[in-house]
Amino acid sequence: MTISRRDFIGRSGSCAAHLALLGAVRPPDARRIWAEWSRGSIVAHEPFGNLEKISDGVWALISTPFNNDRTTISNGGLIAGRNGILAIEGFNQQAGATWLAAKARDLTGKWLTHVALTHYHSDHANGLAGYFGLAVGGNKPIVRSTQRTRELVVERNKPADSSRESALADAVVLSGTEPTTIDLGGKVVRVIPRSGHTDSDVSLELDDPSIVFAGDLLWNNIFPNYVDAVPTKLATSVRELRRAKETTYVPGHGPIARAADYDRYVAMLGEVEQAARRAHAAGTSAADAGAAFTLPASLGEWTLFNKAMFGTAFNAWYKELK
């Protein structure tokens, strides 16, 4: 599949655009290995991803988009308590949300009661209305997002969708500055406002067991999309997410992460920062600096569809360094 630079730039306003091209150039063997890297007990498998149990009442949907199935694209998950069930993310297509809602019913015997969006990007939000169809019993879970996320979904995510806007119309607005909680009965989810990947990110966190749904503040094995990033804020949020005790991290994209994976991600962000600062000081353009940049082999493999994504990262840094 060949896509011009102009077409890519026109489509690159979200993580979905970044990932939509990866499968076309990812070597099949590497695609298979990445898809098979599981750290939970797989309870359901589809071409678009695996639903992995990571603790009692907690499942991560780990998307495997490299086979060109765009149903979900982003990761997400389920957290079930005695009194409620929370779905995390709306995914790229309504079919992804409908599928996850049905799995929640299969696994718990109950319908979803809550849905939370970590940020506005289309692969995390465009399928939101899928939680509201007859296929999931006609029940209406409570949608939770920040006001800014809700605004950006409506303003930027294309094509426009009245059903998605309707699903957001009655959303419970999360604070963009103060932590809030969702009490599911036996499981209290802390929703922490953050920023850096976009200007309205949140993480969803459990303390016991220690589990963090990090949204796109964390990527594992896939180079992150900096298209909306403010790199210094991203670095701050990433440091704040890291826990000293043993923790399961569910990234926005890529396999489930542990402490070593998290630290590798932090080191990768640091390499990008140092290279961007050097190139900016030398007067090298962001595009040229990105084209010349490579990550050290010690950091392992990071998937990206071409080196233009390094240029996007350098451009984000240059905006701050001005």
Image (cartoon, rainbow, N blue to C red):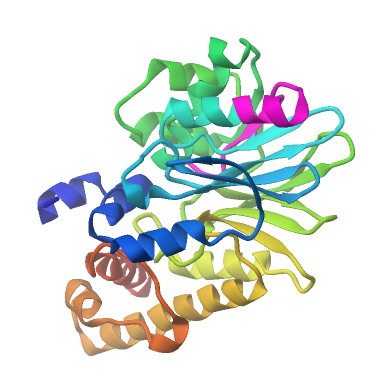
Mark yes or no: residue 254 visible. Answer: no
Mark yes or no: residue 134 visible. Answer: yes
* Identity of the residue drawn at 64% across and 16% down: 140
Location of residue 228 by image quarter: bottom left
Q: Is residue 238 above or below residue 95?
A: below
Q: In this orientation, which residue lies closer to the viewer: 162 or 211?
A: 211
* Identity of the residue drawn at 52% across and 65% down: 233
Q: Is residue 215 above or below residue 128?
A: below
Place of residue 171 in the rendered image (x, y in percent of width and height, measured from the top left)? 61, 25
Place of residue 170 in the rendered image (x, y in percent of width and height, measured from the top left)? 60, 19
* Identity of the residue drawn at 34% across and 84% down: 275
Magenta residues span 102-120
Q: Is residue 235 magenta?
A: no
Q: Is residue 105 magenta?
A: yes
Q: In this orientation, which residue lies closer to the viewer: 267 or 165?
A: 267
Q: In this orientation, which residue lies closer to the viewer: 153 or 322?
A: 153
On screen, residue 292 versus residue 41, left or right, reads left
Place of residue 147 in the rendered image (x, y in percent of width and height, measured from the top left)? 56, 34
On screen, residue 128 versus residue 193, left or right, reads left
On screen, residue 239 versus residue 64, left or right, reads right
